[in-house]
Image (cartoon, grey):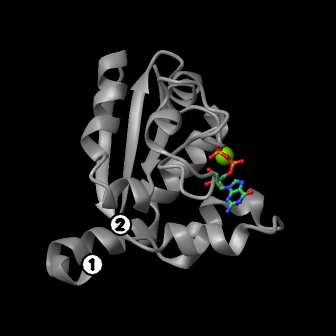
Amino acid sequence: MERTFVMIKPDGVKRGLIGPIITRFEQKGFHLAAMKLMRIDRALAERHYGEHQDRPFFGELVDFLTSGQVCAMVWEGQNAVANTRAIIGATNPVQASPGTIRADFALDIASNIVHGSDSPESAQREIALFFDGAPALETMYRMTGDGAALN
Ligand code: GDP
Ligand code: MG
């Protein structure tokens, strides 16, 4: 059984697409192993997307990721990394195949609804970052103790 990290980005959460997105992974046969709604800080966003730190869009990407709540999830099942990437579709929604999440729900590369790990190694790193790391625990504490402040 392989595990992968999937995150619904702030545009997907704001548009009320958590349900339809989860449905697609469940329909395919994957098992939802962990999930949390959280607000991430710039440090976590920068670490998550560290491979893109020299790209011209990096600042915009971090701004976007920290602009609202995200839904962080761990999905497990057969070839979870490759299969979830296929369900998510190409990075640019214009190039994504019909039937993929990005083709069906998004218009723009900067707000393409959902993230999925690109390899088993990335999945392990990202799951640790979001589910085992200090920022995630701190956020869970804040959600329990002061949920209203997150909106
Ligand atoms: P992914 O693995 O398919 O999400 O794509 P990448 O790892 O290449 O890029 C990470 C994220 O950066 C993408 O999902 C986009 O949201 C964003 N991104 C990629 N290219 C661009 C770009 O040219 N402009 C902007 N604003 N964002 C981009
Ligand atoms: Mg990527």
Q: In the depicted view, which residue is nearer to us: 2 or 146?
A: 146
At numbered mark 1, what does the secondary structure look like: helix, strand or loop? helix
Residue 36 figure quarter: bottom left
Q: In the depicted view, which residue is nearer to us: 95 or 126?
A: 95
Residue 146 figure quarter: bottom left
Q: Is residue 90 left or right of residue 42?
A: right
Marks 2/1 in contact by CB < 8 Å: the verdict is: yes
Q: Give x and y (percent) for residue 16.
A: 27, 52
* Crowdedness near tag 1: few (<14), some (14–19) or many (≥20) residues, C-alpha within 10 Å: few
Q: Give x and y (percent) for residue 123.
A: 57, 40
Disc 2 residue type (three-letter): Gln
Find disc 1 in the rendering and name its residue.
Answer: 150
Find disc 2 in the rendering and name its residue.
Answer: 69
Query: Vertically, is 26 above or below 72?
Result: above
Q: Quadrant of the C terminus?
A: bottom left
At numbered mark 2, what does the secondary structure look like: helix, strand or loop? loop
Residue located 60% across and 71% down the image: 62
Residue located 30% across and 19% down the image: 27
Q: Give x and y (percent) for residue 28.
A: 37, 17
The mark that comes first in sequence, 2 or 1, is 2
Disc 1 residue type (three-letter): Leu
Query: Vertically, is 18 above or below 54?
Result: above
